Amino acid sequence: MKIAIDFDGTIVEHKYPAIGKENLFAFETMRELQKQKHQLILWTYRSGKELDDAVEFCRDRDVEFYAVNKSFPEEVYDESISRKIDADLFIDDRNIGGFPGWSAVWQMLNPDDAEKVKELKRIQAENAARKKKKGLFRSR
């Protein structure tokens, strides 16, 4: 499976343009997904030096991506144009309900039984309910 993974807010805490503290279980989960032969794509807003720094940060933690900001390694990509990439799954902190955490991602991709999936959905719903709303939808 091709899995596109965001960097800021997903692999690391959101501190752009700096690199934030790595999120709990991020690299352990990505390395295990690679062992299962999933193709991981770094899919991020970063470009130039900030992108190079993010790729190196991950490489230093033994995660080498199949592709970076493109669907496959040989793709010629114009960084001035924002577009979607071809992936089966997107892991991003901007999902509806927010990012459930790497432990939940691992369990969703490797469920032992239906009860675990049910529990994960409950945890995800609780996390979404706790997340503070911003902008027009600010809670009072």
Image (cartoon, rainbow, N blue to C red):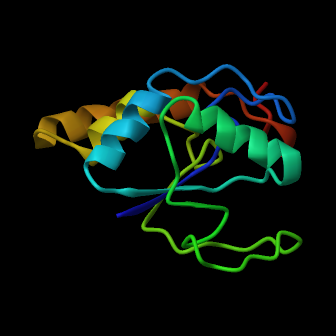
Up-down relation of residue 9 to residue 36 (above or below): above
Q: What residue appears at the point 19 percent right and 34 percent down from the top-left corner?
A: 116
Query: In which image quadrant can residue 84 be found?
Result: bottom right
Up-down relation of residue 132 to residue 105 (above or below): above
Query: In which image quadrant can residue 75 be found?
Result: bottom right
Q: Is residue 101 visible?
A: no
Q: Is residue 93 visible?
A: yes
Depth order, front residue of 86/92: 86
Which quadrant is the N terminus positioned in?
A: bottom left
Residue farthest along the left direction in this orientation: 113
Position of residue 15 in the picture relative to residue 9 (left or right): right
Up-down relation of residue 82 to residue 108 (above or below): below
Up-down relation of residue 70 to residue 23 (above or below): below
Position of residue 5 in the picture relative to residue 121 (left or right): right
The picture places residue 90, in percent across and down from the top left corner, at 51, 57
The picture places residue 4, in percent across and down from the top left corner, at 53, 57
The picture places residue 135, in percent across and down from the top left corner, at 86, 40
Q: What residue appears at the point 54 percent right and 73 percent down from the top-left corner?
A: 72
The picture places residue 57, in percent across and down from the top left corner, at 65, 33
Depth order, front residue of 78/109: 78
Q: What residue appears at the point 71 percent right and 80 percent down from the top-left corner?
A: 76
Depth order, front residue of 24/63: 63
Q: What residue appears at the point 63 percent right and 28 percent down from the top-left corner?
A: 131
Position of residue 10 in the picture relative to residue 52 (left or right): left
* Number of on-image labels: 0
